[in-house]
Image: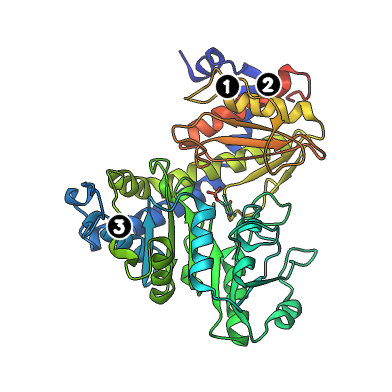
Amino acid sequence: MNLESMYQSRGVSPQVYAYGQKIEQELTERFAAIDETAEYNQLKVIGAMQKHRVSDIHFAGTSGYGYNDMGRDTLEEVYAETFHTESALVRPQITCGTHALAVALAANLRPGDELLAISGKPYDTLEEVIGIRPSNGSLAEYGVTYRQVDLLSDDSFDWQGIKEAIRACTKMVHIQRSKGYQTRKTLSVAEIQEAISFVKSIRPDLICMVDNCYGEFVERLEPSDVGADLCVGSLIKNPGGGLAPAGGYIVGKEAYVENCAYRLTSPGLGKEVGATFGVMQSFYQGFFLAPTVTAGALKGAIFAANLYERLGFSVLPNGQESRHDIIQAITFGKPEGVIAFCKGIQAAAPVDSFAEPSPAPMPGYDSDVIMAAGAFVQGSSIELSADGPIKPPYAVYFQGGLTWEHAKFGILMSLQKLVDEGITHVP
Ligand SMILES: *Cc1c(COP(=O)(O)O)cnc(C)c1O
């Protein structure tokens, strides 16, 4: 059987396949550049593992207090080496990205301190952490105040606004690399560098924290290479490489990471406790795979942007833009488009491919939401996944793919569903 018949046997018509091939061929150069970044980052990660003499002894799990967990301590050295930071906290006890960010904030802010967000409103789940939306246990309840400077209409930093917002009580600056579910651009590491330099030129003692979710390994440099004091993310996104079953990381300056450890476990105990059960091998192996997994996801995002842009749908980022995270938004303009897209992604999944996603109410959303995910790790968004709120402009956000091959199949399947529903047709 040739490849075309193989796709046909999985439900992708020869017309959709041929259109996909044409798009893919036009992306040869961009894909080569992505492979080169992956190659660079692969050497970076292997180099860190070699330098810290990773060995199978590090894959053994501990229980109870987890004192002297060599696997855990060495993995933290490997992360610190890779991100070029003094220290790292990489733990299965960090439950998700929001938790990692909440720990980094609460650990380094004290009553009377002010947090200043300079890339606009932080990711939705942080609203309750900070207390932008009142919540039990928020930073606001502990007397930490908050200010925000929005990006300008062209998505650049508001230098004047930032300068004016920095006050005596300002302690920490929050920068979010990825656009998350907003319609702004994702920040490049170069733009983040400029912002950090600017902040430090006003007050060198301000702690610059970057929410690095979805950005890891997309470029050769990380925000920690360009002055970020803390860099934070989730292990069920890029750096977990699809293998980490849970967890989060915080890398940065020794003193700030130390504070995070005291907050995560307990004052006095810090990094010394925290059993790893048996997850260390998947943390190491996932980190080893992360550069190529991220590359696959990135190719998928670019492929989808070009495939749908050519059919007249509006896509963000567009087909040509340079990439700084793995998220792709596609606007369909009507609910049927969002639903068909998600059905296609689900139908191409290795897990739960038989499930049919449908819109449903979700806590925290003001409209029904449809989600497609057929993942090995529950909620993992480095695996191919999509979701969209059923409200104008009827856009779907999609990301991930542990392999480029799977991402391609999922995207072709999404298009097939749209074609089958008569929402679009391929040229
Ligand atoms: C995913 C994400 C988070 C939160 O991570 P969870 O693991 O979902 O809690 C925070 N910030 C950004 C930019 C994200 O993409």
Q: Which residue is mark 2?
A: 417
Q: Is mark 2 within 8 Å of ligand 1?
A: no
Q: Which residue is mark 3?
A: 75
- Which is closer to the viewer, label 3 or label 2? 3
Report whether 251 appears left or right of 52.
right
Q: Between marks 3 and 2, how big is the CA–CA gap? A: 43 Å
Of residues 46 and 169, the one drawn nearer to the viewer in this rendering:
169
Q: Residue at 56% across / 14% down in the picture?
A: 8
Do tag 1 and tag 2 residues touch (Cβ < 8 Å)? yes
Q: Is residue 409 above or below residue 30?
A: above
Secondary element under disc 3, as helix, strand or loop, is helix
Q: Residue at 46% across / 45% down in the picture?
A: 236
Of residues 27 and 85, the one drawn nearer to the viewer in this rendering:
85
Report whether 15 appears left or right of 150.
left
Do tag 3 and tag 1 residues touch (Cβ < 8 Å)? no
Secondary element under disc 1, as helix, strand or loop, is helix
- Answer with mark 3 or mark 1, whichever residue precedes in sequence: 3
- Image mark for residue 347: 1
**Residue 238 drawn at (x, y percent):** 47, 49
Can residue 18 be seen here? The reply is no
- Which is closer to the viewer, label 1 or label 2? 1
Q: Is residue 252 above or below residue 382?
A: below
- Answer with mark 1 or mark 2, whichever residue precedes in sequence: 1
The number of discs equals 3
Q: Between marks 1 and 2, how big is the CA–CA gap? A: 10 Å
